[in-house]
Structures are given as structure tokens and as C-alpha cells.
Amino acid sequence: MKKIHFEKHRCKGCGLCVIFCPQKNLRMSEDLNDQGLSYPEEIDPACCNACGLCFRMCPDTAIEIHPEGVKNSKK
Amino acid sequence: MQTLKRTEVLKDALTHYCPGCGHGIIHRLVAEVIEELGIREITIGTAPVGCAVLLYDYFNCDIIECSHGRPPAVATGIKRIHPDKIVFTYQGDGDLAAIGTAETIHAANRGENITVIFVNNAIYGMTGGQMAPTTLTGMVSTTSRDGRGQHGEGPPLKVCELLSSLDGVYYLERTAVSTPKDVNSTKRAIKKAFQNQIDGKGFSLVEVLSMCPTDWKVSTAKAVDFVNNDMKEVFPLGVYKDKS
Ligand SMILES: Cc1ncc(C[n+]2csc(CCOP(=O)(O)OP(=O)(O)O)c2C)c(N)n1
Ligand code: SF4
Ligand SMILES: [Mg+2]
């Protein structure tokens, strides 16, 4: 179940979330967002325990944590 | 566990800050505190000159833009005319500790009942990386090419230590935003600084050590290391004054 939603258009690609994910579950994408920047993606959604450290370190409020699972409308 | 997302106290706007800049984290913490204390509609912020100059574009509360270094003076006026409002300043190190030193020290000494958020990134960010009063000894900036201290610049100014001698000051704490633990501690300190004002206690200041990867000319990872290893050594974290 996916618990993190990335507002990828908000992301500036700083990578603070990747540095601080305690599960080492994030990496920067190959794909680029509208600003032409890499954004974070999960390596294995099953590893995420919704601890929220990525949310806390994100300077751009580009991350949402939904412990009960991200709704389908938010892919 | 709770759902975590952007608080309504922040507008939906994309900020102009550089990737990895600490200002965005500190904005979110201030906004979350304003939301949790339920004071959005009575809060008035005073914005600095510096990278945070566009504060009013990002916060869903009243914000007034001040001349460089003058937020504590403007906040004094607002708070005295509207004692029922919650008034905060948000200032960089150039704003608060260089051009605005007099305003800072006198507002603190008068014990004005305001909340000061002081973002110490050891550099003039907005203008392209000139030496700030808080630039570390040996640190290279565009105006200390050989490293601070080689040409009589003196050592970095320690604002919390300096203000702690003033009787008017109620609360001083230095925190950082370079680890998740530091981010949480910063939020607690900011909340306390706002609560003190609500309780009528007087001058509260939180100094936050923050990353400026662009003007330090390093990666995000190196910027975090610089705060954690170098800045924290010169600017030890902790509570410098708490009259409660
Ligand atoms: C009266 C005046 N003097 C100088 C400036 C140029 N100036 C703009 S921002 C700034 C310093 C900003 O540094 P800081 O307060 O540390 O904020 P940061 O950008 O690092 O967040 C200076 C000197 C100005 N705008 N007005
Ligand atoms: S110059 Fe520094 S302080 Fe200013 S937005 Fe960029 S990283 Fe932030
Ligand atoms: Mg600065």
C-alpha cells in the first residue's frame, strides 16, 4: 500500500528526503517534473512505515503522508 | 499515526527558495505552530529584507514588509497599538544582526512582547553570498575571499549569547533544521516563543541554524553536514534564557 504522495510539481529536487529516509526507501527519479528536475520516488512502497521524516525535512511541502494509504485519485 | 500535509496557514504558492534551503522548512514550522495555536486570524508577521522578503506571498496571515533590519521596530509599533494581536518577526542574520542590530538589541532590552524567528545561515543569501556577522571564522564568502578572520573581520557574532545578558529578554533558544530531530526541536521552540507572547511574557527569540547550499556553493548533503559539524560547534544549540 502506498503511504507517501509526492506533489512532484512542487519538488525542487534537493534530495533531503532521500538523505533522511531511515528505510533508504527513496531515490531521485529518472523522469523530470515540469520544472525539469528529478523528484523522489519510492523504491519499495512496502518498506514505508509512514514515519514522516521525509515530510519533516521537505522545504517545499511537496510530500504528504497518508498512514491509511494514498487515495486512488492521487497516483 | 496522523496524515501529514501542508498546513492551510501556508498558501499553495511555490516558493522562490533554492533547492535544499532551510527557509522553506522554517516557514512550514512557523505556519504549523500558528495553526496549532489557532491564532491565524490574529497574527501579524513582519518580513525582513533578505531571501525571506516575499514572506507575504507564502503565509495566509497578515504580513507587513519592513525596511532592512527594522522588523523588531515595526513589530514593536504594531504590538503596542494592537496588544491583542500576535506579532512575529522573521529575519535573516544580515537583517537581524548587521543592519538591524540596534533594533534587535533595543526591542529585546525593552522586553517587547513579540516573537522573533531568527534564521542564521551564516551568509547574506539574497545578495549572493557576502560575509554576514555570523559567518564562521575561516569561512570563504564573496567579501571574505581568504576566509573570515584574515583581514580583521573579527569572530562571528553570537546573538543568543549576546542577548542573554539583557534583563528584558524572556526566552532565547538556538535550534537547527539540519536533522529531523532538530526540525522537531525547532517546532517546539517556536511554539514556546509564540505561547510566551500569548501569555504576555515578553521578548522571545528562536535562532535557527539553517542551510544555504547556493551561497555556500555546496550540495544539499554537504550543506546539512556543514550545519551539523561546523555551525553547531561555533553556535551550540540549547536554551540560552528561559524566565519561566
Ligand atoms: C538598506 C539596505 N542595505 C542593503 C541592502 C542589500 N541587502 C539585501 S538583503 C541583504 C542581506 C540579506 O542577508 P540575510 O539577512 O542574512 O538574509 P538571507 O538572504 O541570508 O536569508 C542585504 C545586505 C538593502 N536591501 N537595503
Ligand atoms: S540564496 Fe541561500 S538562503 Fe537564499 S533562497 Fe537560496 S539557499 Fe535559501
Ligand atoms: Mg543570512
Image (cartoon, rainbow, N blue to C red):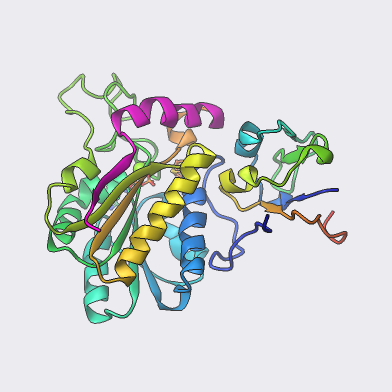
Q: How many marks?
A: 0
Inspect this view and state whether residue B47 appears.
Answer: no
Inspect this view and state whether residue B184 appears.
Answer: yes
Residue A31 vertical placement versus B142 (above, below): below
Residue B239 vertical placement versus B34 (above, below): above
Quadrant hosting residue B147: top left
- Please name the residue shown 79% across and 33% down the image: A30
Please provide percent x and percent y for residue B117: 35, 54
Which residue range is magenta in the image?
B220-244
Quadrant hosting residue A36: top right
Please provide percent x and percent y for residue A45: 82, 41
- Please name the residue shown 78% across and 50% down the image: A3
Which quadrant is home to the C terminus of chain B? bottom left
Please provide percent x and percent y for residue B103: 18, 57
Quadrant hosting residue A38: top right
Question: Along the horizontal axis of the image, is B144 left or right of B55?
Answer: left
Q: Is residue B225 magenta?
A: yes
In terms of secondary structure, what is the magenta stretch mainly?
Answer: helix
- Please name the residue shown 48% across and 73% down the image: B38
Residue A63 vertical placement versus B158 (above, below): below
Which quadrant is home to the N terminus of chain B? bottom right
Please provide percent x and percent y for residue A33: 75, 45
Question: Along the horizontal axis of the image, is A17 left or right of A28?
Answer: left
Q: Is residue B56 magenta?
A: no
Closest to the observer: B102 or B162?
B162
Closest to the observer: B154 or B210?
B210
